[in-house]
Amino acid sequence: MAGNTDPLSPRAKLAVTAGRAAAAASRAVGRGSGSVIGGKVALRLDPDLLARLAQHLDVVLVSATNGKTTTTRLIAEALRASGPVVSNALGANMPAGITSALAGGSDAKYGVIEVDEKYLAGVARDVTPKAIALLNLSRDQLDRAAETRMLAEKWREGLAGSKALVVANADDPLIVWAASSSANVVWVAAGQEWKDDAWSCPACGGVMQRPGDDWFCPDPDCGFRRPTPSWALSGDHVLDPHGSAWPIKLQLPGRANKANATTSAAVAAAFGVPPQVALERMYSVQAVAGRYDVVSFMERELRLLLAKNPAGWLETFSLIDPPPTPVILSVNARGADGTDTSWLWDVDYTRLAGHPIFVIGDRKLDLAVRLEVAGLDFQVCENVDEAVQKAPPGRIEVIANYTAFQDLRRRVGN
């Protein structure tokens, strides 16, 4: 029950203290925030610590291939209208990072937690969430992640029997398949620009029909189709279940973030926060873990954008300034990115035609080959400093995948 502040057991307290010490040591030697190592140490001492830390919270879990960090932040801001919130705001979204985040939330009412797709079912078992937000599923980190249909099936199995309210994107067939095992689902028409992972019916394997915004399996023996949503994104407004339209006024750019705000408003409403209040609070979010930040570097303005997979790149291309705005692209293939770069061939880089393009990152030559095949003009540079020096005047859009983005943030002082 939320609001229960029963003290932790001595073992749990020891685990939390040891975890904080490990995190502090990690920070002291410059190894990052320490949240992951701190959580690992704490869970080693008390394997049930995550469940213990969550027992007094009303928990919301957020999972997806793209948008989960931003949506987690938007939901957290909305729920703060009703009480204090603890959240893994910096995106440490596996059990160790989640444990570290919740260890600092003894006075919180709500826990708003981003969860890596592979760990959703397990974390849901541990923390008994009141709500789960499911945004989208698409190909990502091909060397470590299961095929999307398999992942949807694991979610479906994990959510069966859950008492949580599932707030799910009605426009993604894989999300609908995963959520349909739940007894209590709120469907949101949040949209889905990337469709290349959802042409096969997850129920029977047939070829999906997708006329306009609708979708359905044509097999009469299957009947799998888009559910009727009760919440919807409509232009610059959120439509609630009563048909009222609430304006979305975000500082975050792009259609995808309006979709994230729509899902966030639906989640907030389930906790008693009205759409108008929720959406007004979301306006305060200017950036999320450095994403969308505009920074000054070498006397130039750079906007930092994260894109980790084909669906994410597609959404990012839709929000950058038009040509002749210069664009810097940076791609790595380290462990946190996924070491398989074949996904580059699924991205429609022709959308960058007309932009001066500069390529950096560990895998800049892989990306250069892809851009060459796409028929684009570009320059390969050794680092962001050289790229900025060569870029023509104007604000520069910088698009990078995960570790490349972290490298850029460290270099430009963000």
Image (cartoon, rainbow, N blue to C red):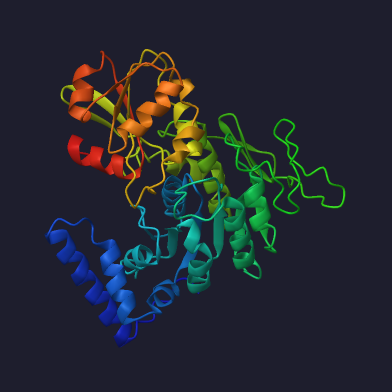
Answer above or below: position of 323 versus 25. Answer: above
Q: Residue at x 40, y 73 (%)?
A: 50
Q: Is residue 286 left or right of residue 120?
A: left
Residue 13 drawn at (x, y percent): 28, 80
Q: Residue at x 44, y 63 (%)?
A: 110
**In the image, residue 67 lies at what x, y percent?**
47, 44
Left/right placement of residue 9 relative to residue 68 reads left
From this viewpoint, is residue 304 visible? Answer: no
Residue 114, placed above or below residue 296: below
Q: Quadrant of residue 342?
A: top left
Q: Quadrant of the C terminus?
A: top left
The residue shown at (32%, 48%) is 334
At x 74%, y 47%, the residue is 227
Front residue of 212 and 375:
375
Q: Decide if residue 386 is in sight here.
A: yes
- The picture places residue 347, in percent across and down from the top left corner, at 49, 32
